[in-house]
Amino acid sequence: MRHLISISLSCLFLLYGCSDNKEETELPQDYESEFPTESFIRSHLLTEKGLIQTNVTNRENEFLSESLGLYLLFLVERDRADEFASQVDVLTEHFLHASNLVSWRLERTNDELTRSPANAWIDDARIVHALYEAGDAFDEPSYIELAEQIGTSLTSIGVKDGIPVDFVDLATKERGDVLTLSYLDEDALRHMAVNDLYDNSKQVLSNAPLSEPFFAKSYVISTQTYQFDEEINMIDQLYVALRYEQFGLSTASFYSFFKETFNDGIVYGRYDLNSKKPTVNYESQAVYALAIFYLLERDERDFAERVMNRLTSSMVSDSSSDYYGGYLDVDTKETHAFDNLLPLLAEGGLIDGYLIP
């Protein structure tokens, strides 16, 4: 994952073989979507075999469990049972490890796929959430069973001292020692409630110090200490703010900062922890998409719609363009699946209810 995977997880990316002998499930790509962004994703990121490319340039042969989980949430939100089933096939055939944890990245070389030897708690949890939602929505017990299998491994192998860890080495079962606070998906934790895991997770959030208006980035389990980044990533901050709201915890200071910053003109992608000044000159589609979910959790629908208007203003709006609907720099072709899937989920969620990513 571009935004949330820790450096230590990235260092584990010593790839081992992933079965490429199974027949991959083919997905229809001629679906006429009501969402231009979905049409862009299907045309430029979704392969014929159902895998979602990370981008269209230098990472077109990389496929993330993050993308899979977000797309699963979108499909169940839109009541698309057949395609959801096809994506579950992609999950079980390519991403699911024998441990019942999910490899966070696949990489294609020629016709061979190789798997990362690590998972990412947030990706597994998001997939568990989507499977539980689909089990109910589509009356499909096998999704519940699969969610329970992944959840059982996640809450045993992926936990240290009663607290989730960012990742596990799938080969050795060695756990990380850090929890990134934005990983605490309340919906998934509620489904996977075992022992005191839910309460422990909420306690980690409620005990976290603030460097107002910013949240801590992570919690080191062995030392019971919190860490702040000197350069604040607003994607991470909005994810943490969303988690606080999910657990019923206050985000008043951050909300005031975000509202004032948005009303002043631009919410930049990164800020200095101490000066509270932007350190970059770019906006982020993912920031605005996550802000929509955050604001909906706060019952700020009017504000969320204003943010959606800002978000869609950066979409390729020329209907004659091959990239129509995409959140993409037409000149450089720079984009990321995350920056398209999150806006797609946010747009669908504003129409008729939402699932938190």
Image (cartoon, helix red, strand yellow):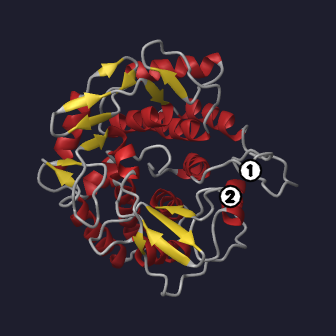
Residue 175 falls in which quadrant of the image? bottom left
* Foreground of the two, 219 or 135: 219
Report the number of discs: 2
The residue at 43%/19% (across/down) is: 273
Label 1 – label 2 distance at C-alpha: 7 Å
Left or right: 37 as drawn, with respect to 85: right
- The numbered mark, 1 or 2, whose residue comes first in the sequence reads 2
Residue 13 falls in which quadrant of the image? bottom left
Identity, as a three-letter code, of the amino acid under mark 1:
Lys
The residue at 37%/40% (across/down) is: 182
User: Can residue 288 be seen here?
Assistant: yes
* Residue at disc 2, secondary structure: loop
* Residue 44 point in image, percent of width and height: 70, 62
Looking at the image, the residue that sits furthest to the top is 275
Identity, as a three-letter code, of the amino acid under mark 2:
Val
User: Can residue 298 be seen here?
Assistant: no
* Residue 191 point in image, percent of width and height: 27, 58
Q: Name the residue under label 1.
A: 333
* Residue at disc 1, secondary structure: loop
* Residue 326 point in image, percent of width and height: 71, 51
CA neighbours of label 1 inside 10 A, class few (<14), some (14 to 19), many (20+): few
Vertically, is 104 above or below 135?
above
* Residue 345 point in image, percent of width and height: 55, 51
Q: Residue 35 carries which label?
A: none
Image marks 1 and 2: residues in contact by CB distance under 8 Å: yes
Q: Which mark is residue 56?
A: 2
Vertically, is 314 above or below 357?
above
* Foreground of the two, 316 or 175: 175
